[in-house]
Image: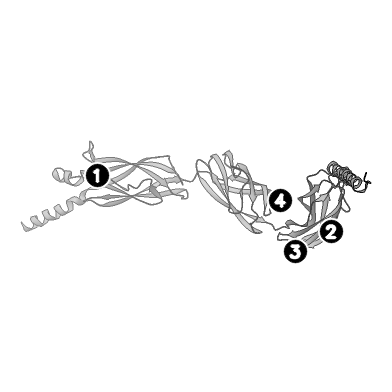
Amino acid sequence: MKKMIIFMMVFLMMAPMGFAVKAELLNTDPYPLESGQMADMRFKITYSDVPPGEEREDKISRLNVTFVDTAIKLADDKRERSFVLKEDHTDDFYQMIEYRVSVGDVPEGEVPVILEFGGDFEKKETIHVRVTDDQPEFSIGHVFSSPDDLYPDSNDNKLEVQVANIGDDIAESVILELHSDSFIPSSSLSTRYGIGSLEESQTGKGEFYVDIPEEIKPGEHTFNVSIISEEITEEKEIPFYVKGKPSFSLDALYNEPVRQGEDSFLKFELENTGNEEADRVSVDVVKDHTVDIEFEQYTDFVGDLEPGQEGEIFIPFSVGDAAVKDNQMTFSVRYVFDDEVKTDNFPVNVRVLEREKAFYEDPGILLAAIVLIIVGAILARLIFSPEK
């Protein structure tokens, strides 16, 4: 009798352990799963070897299933779901569950998915899911600029970036976007370029126009390219080099108004405000044949200018019958840099006043002089005429 009681107790304790739970992957969409993409997964959960009667109803009428995050994660925050199990024709209980998942960037192969069952019966089951990395992948090819050398305080620099699809699938609707703290778009959307579709091993290019601000220091900088497609987005960092160069400012030391027919001179201070030396600097006056101003010399030689160094320009001239106004001239600063002759042009205004007239050419002065003469004659006659 004692042995029978012990046997019954052991049986009752072991009975719950007789439950068997099984998770079966029904399908995935897409199949196989794609690395870095969203997907749907459907499972069938089956409870078998369930004892009959009330014990069965009490213990497995509801089932808690927790999706344990691995490289495949739930797309929402609901990691645990509860289901009312259905009885099938074999007296087992089952339920279908579906998860929306995000597949991590994993190499091609089998990726584990772990389901954890809760309640009176606890178990973890691992199912391996096939994942492929058949998707686009991008690489940066050649990068060109026009002009070849990029400088601070330059506008409309053209950048051409080649992009290749080195992946295993087509890339649809590819768009390139450029970002950098070292330049700004030359115009609206000039740093965004649509390529279209890129087949496997196909190369496309984007063209961009950027301005480099004056405060950007010479040296190596970087810009980022966002490669955006319907399937994937990648960021690439690209180095580029900003060169130093001479730059000039022109300040007037003497530029007073001058009258028609008079001689005068222009005196300016030329400063190298850049960060590189300018060799053999000279200033040319660009002759404008529509303006009647003649210069005794059209060039003044300054010499070499280090960054921050100043030179003086002195140019005498004479004014003919130039228009009475601010007559604009052009000073062309010529210098040698990187073994090339370069020029920077500056507008210079010469204010011309109307020529001074002789008194006999001015009707007002002439009339006043005549009036004075007549009045003087009358007064003299009255004073010096004999009395009657």
* Distance from Cα at disc 3 to Cα at disc 2: 15 Å
Characterize the local packing of mark 4: few (<14), some (14-19) or many (20 or more) Cα atoms within 10 angstroms.
few
Amino acid type at circle 4 is: Asp
Tell us which disc is closer to us: 3 or 1. Answer: 3
Characterize the local packing of mark 3: few (<14), some (14-19) or many (20 or more) Cα atoms within 10 angstroms.
some
Q: Which label's residue is closer to the chain start, 3 or 1?
A: 1
Res. 301 mark? 2
Comparing 213 with 56, the one in front is 213
Question: With respect to residue 44, does 123 lie above or below?
Answer: below
Measuring from the top left, give residue 14's x and y in whole percent: 18, 53
User: Which residue sits at x=32%, y=43%?
Assistant: 24
Amino acid type at circle 1 is: Tyr
Dots 3 and 4: beta carbons under 8 Å? no
Q: Which label's residue is closer to the chain start, 3 or 4?
A: 4
Q: Tell me which corner region of the image, top left, top right, bottom left or bottom right, holds residue 63.
A: top left
Question: With respect to residue 333, does 322 lie above or below?
Answer: above
Q: What residue is pinned by disc 3?
A: 309
Q: What residue is pinned by disc 1?
A: 47
Q: In which quarter of the image is the C terminus?
A: top right
Tell us which disc is closer to us: 4 or 1. Answer: 4
Residue at the far right: name it. Answer: 386
Amino acid type at circle 2 is: Phe
Give the left or right position of residue 243, taking residue 48 as reference.
right
Dots 4 and 1: beta carbons under 8 Å? no
Q: Can residue 298 be seen in this view?
A: no
* Distance from Cα at disc 4 to Cα at disc 2: 30 Å
Q: What residue is pinned by disc 4?
A: 148
Q: SS of the residue at dot 1?
A: strand
Comparing 25 with 81, the one in front is 81
Q: SS of the residue at dot 4?
A: loop
